[in-house]
């Protein structure tokens, strides 16, 4: 029988499904519920040392609906946690007292100061968390403090901050990458070079959900105004899959001992299987929990197990990255197709082609002539 149990960076997980940092992990009550429902681990909502600088507004969500009425896209302009850091430390301790064998990961974000990063890591570590995810990727809010994606777009800063954190803790450190960049491999490579034990990808895509054609105001509207926010849900899954593939290829080639957690539009076991096939060790879900509730982990686990049984995979490692070898360049695709067409139109055996004639024929096939 296949098993979903896995060990990543020394963390023993009953399954690869993690609550992603965000509203589903916003306090001890919901984290407790997630563990009781069977999630493999919880990454708590991002915290910082000084929550007084964080002011959330309302409304802060907007949705994109398909013609059927299904929500396929979700925008948020929510900031990191506005709850006092001392409250979080207390809840981290209580959570680990209640669930000593479950994995709790602290998502942290700070300004570009070594002392701040060292302090937040030391205090969270003392509270008993099992690992850290460094939020280098929130696309909105606090850019004036060079936090979130404002930091994650700069490979030099990423490498330095990851170095500060890794020098402070021996626990796993994952760098959460922003998709709001042309090539995700370079910042990912910098984070790993700095000492991150793994990467998480992707965070939300910077977006404007739309404009209300009655009021002429962009949404979500707060006192008649808005700001660009983060786009999530199933509509971003193709972007997430592409970036996970790119990071996984880089990791496999250069740093095969590092891990990768994939996220972006995962709502089913089939979705999760695709991320793992492209090199992810674990998968994270945030908007899916907001849409379907914490209980959605059970059918996702069942569907992933069904996929594994169908293909006779016993463990996640049996199919991790199995689809990566099938990516190549467009030029190579052209050559492969030309070769296949040439093979299908092999001349009679009594006809001797010269080398020049074969080249001309191959060129003609490639052009569709």
Image (cartoon, helix red, strand yellow):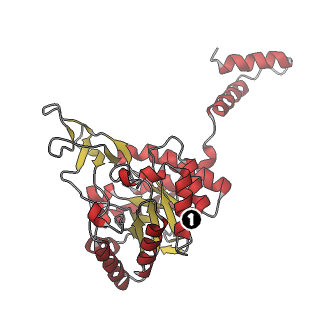
* Displayed quadrant of residue 85: bottom left
* Horizontal and vertical percent position of residue 175: 50, 60
Of residues 248 and 4, the one drawn nearer to the viewer in this rendering: 248
User: Does residue 233 appear left or right of residue 126 in this picture?
Assistant: left
Residue occupying the point 83% across, 22% down: 349
Where is 324 relative to 125, above or below?
A: above
User: Does residue 108 appear left or right of residue 36 in this picture?
Assistant: right
* Displayed quadrant of residue 288: bottom left
Of residues 161 and 237, the one drawn nearer to the viewer in this rendering: 161
Inspect this view and state whether residue 40 appears. Answer: no
Where is 237 relative to 291, above or below?
A: above
Of residues 356 and 342, the one drawn nearer to the viewer in this rendering: 356
Residue occupying the point 23% across, 46% down: 62
Of residues 255 and 292, the one drawn nearer to the viewer in this rendering: 255
Residue occupying the point 49% across, 71% down: 5
* Horizontal and vertical percent position of residue 147: 40, 55
Q: Secondary structure at mark 1?
A: helix
Q: Quadrant of the C terminus?
A: top right
Inspect this view and state whether residue 137 appears. Answer: yes
- Kindly identify which residue carries mark 1: 163
Q: In this view, which residue lies farthest toward the bottom?
A: 97
* Horizontal and vertical percent position of residue 79: 30, 56
């Amino acid at each position: 029988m296949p098993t979903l149990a896995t060990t990543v960076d020394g963390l023993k997980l009953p399954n690869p499904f993690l609550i992603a940092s965000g509203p589903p992990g916003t306090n001890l009550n919901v984290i407790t519920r997630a563990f009781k429902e069977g999630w493999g681990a919880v990454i708590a909502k991002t915290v910082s040392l000084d929550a007084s600088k964080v002011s959330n507004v309302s409304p802060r969500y907007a949705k994109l609906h398909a013609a059927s009425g299904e929500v396929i896209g979700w925008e948020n302009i929510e900031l990191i946690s506005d709850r006092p850091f001392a409250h979080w430390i207390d809840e981290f301790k209580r959570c680990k007292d209640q669930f000593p064998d479950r994995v709790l990961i602290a998502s942290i974000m700070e300004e570009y100061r070594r002392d701040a990063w060292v302090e937040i890591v030391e205090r969270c570590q003392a509270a008993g968390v099992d690992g850290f995810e460094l939020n280098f990727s929130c696309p909105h809010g606090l850019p004036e403090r060079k936090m979130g994606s404002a930091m994650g777009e700069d490979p030099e800063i990423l490498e330095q901050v990851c170095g500060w954190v890794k020098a402070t803790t021996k626990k796993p450190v994952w760098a959460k990458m922003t998709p709001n960049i042309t090539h995700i491999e370079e910042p990912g490579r910098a984070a790993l070079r700095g000492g991150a034990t793994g990467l998480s990808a992707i965070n939300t895509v910077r977006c404007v959900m739309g404009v209300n054609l009655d009021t002429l105001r962009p949404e979500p509207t707060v006192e008649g105004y808005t700001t660009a926010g983060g786009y999530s849900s199933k509509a971003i899954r193709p972007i997430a899959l592409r970036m996970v593939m790119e990071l996984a290829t880089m990791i496999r080639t250069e740093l095969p001992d590092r891990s990768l957690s994939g996220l972006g539009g995962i709502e089913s076991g089939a979705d999760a299987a695709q991320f793992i096939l492209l090199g992810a060790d674990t998968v994270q879900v945030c908007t899916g929990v907001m849409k379907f509730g914490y209980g959605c982990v059970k059918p996702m686990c069942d569907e992933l197990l069904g996929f594994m049984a169908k293909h006779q995979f016993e463990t996640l490692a049996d199919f991790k990255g199995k689809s990566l070898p099938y990516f190549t360049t467009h030029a190579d695709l052209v050559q492969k197709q030309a070769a296949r067409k040439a093979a299908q139109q092999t001349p009679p055996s009594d006809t001797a082609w010269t080398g020049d004639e074969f080249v001309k024929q191959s060129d003609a096939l490639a052009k569709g002539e």
